[in-house]
Amino acid sequence: MPLPVVRQLPDGVDSSGKTYKVFSSDHAVAHDKAMSLYFKAFAYLLDRGWAISTVYAVKNEYRLIWLEDANGNCVGGVVWEWLSSIKQSFIILSFVDEAYKGRRLFNVIENALEDETIRLGGTNVAGNVHVDNISRLKAGERTGWVTQFRRLYKDLTPKIAAQKAQKLNPTS
């Protein structure tokens, strides 16, 4: 795999007026601290049952945008995949350091992702969000996201348990 190409994008500003440096890479593994935050966020979603199990944690095709504060600390970002055939950037996971939550950094991250999407010839951005992930849903609403699909889910464990019970006790 070739070395990641890292580009500095225009700075972003949070809701309190603080400025952050914004970087983009064609490989998600370009920044250790960003990936550490990514995996923490991924684990948080997994622990709550909010992650889609069919999403790979990391693939070579994934890209990364991250923010750094004035001290050079990574404070958030997004891992995403460019889908050239449909001119779409697909968010795998956006993340913000706990100490920086509430500063509307998603707006900065999303703006950078939109600009990168347009630079690549894209026309839209998409991603999946669990119905119970209220903070992410609110962030999406604030920045113009709309629901395109609803994923239906049916838990079959009660039926499986009933079938097993029937096999163990066929007279009932």
Image (cartoon, rainbow, N blue to C red):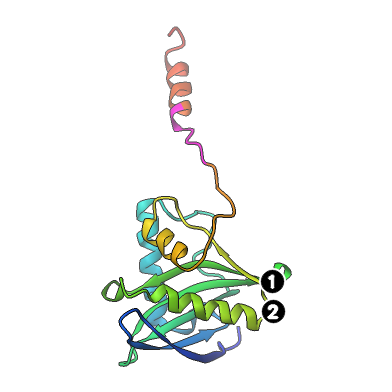
Q: From this view, report whether residue 103 is shown above or below residue 132.
A: below
Q: Position of residue 83 (x, y in %)?
A: 66, 70
**In percent of the image, x 48 and y 22: which residue is there?**
163
- The one of 53 and 72 positioned closer to us in this rendering: 72
Q: Position of residue 51 (x, y in %)?
A: 45, 56
Q: Which mark is residue 87?
A: 1
Q: Magenta region: which residues?
A: 153-158
Q: Label 1: state its secondary structure.
A: loop
Tag 2: residue type? Answer: Gly
Asked if the residue under mark 2 is in contact with the one under mark 1, i.e. CB atoms within 8 Å, the reply is: yes
Q: Which mark is residue 36?
A: none
Quarter containing the C terminus: top left
Q: Is residue 157 magenta?
A: yes
Residue farthest along the left direction in this orientation? 99
For residue 30, side relative to residue 86 (left or right)? left
Q: From this view, report whether residue 146 is shown above or below residue 103.
A: above
**In percent of the image, x 30 and y 81: which residue is there?**
16
- Magenta span: chief secondary structure: loop
For residue 98, side relative to residue 77 (left or right)? left
- The one of 47 and 111 positioned closer to us in this rendering: 111
Q: Position of residue 111 (x, y in %)?
A: 50, 78
Q: Position of residue 37 (x, y in %)?
A: 37, 73
Question: In terms of image quadrants, where is residue 17?
Answer: bottom left
**In percent of the image, x 49 and y 80: which residue is there?**
65
- The one of 159 and 80 positioned closer to us in this rendering: 80
- The one of 156 and 108 positioned closer to us in this rendering: 108
Circle 2 Cα neighbour tier, 10 Å, few/some/many (<14 / 14–19 / ≥20): few
Which residue is disc 2 drawn over? 121
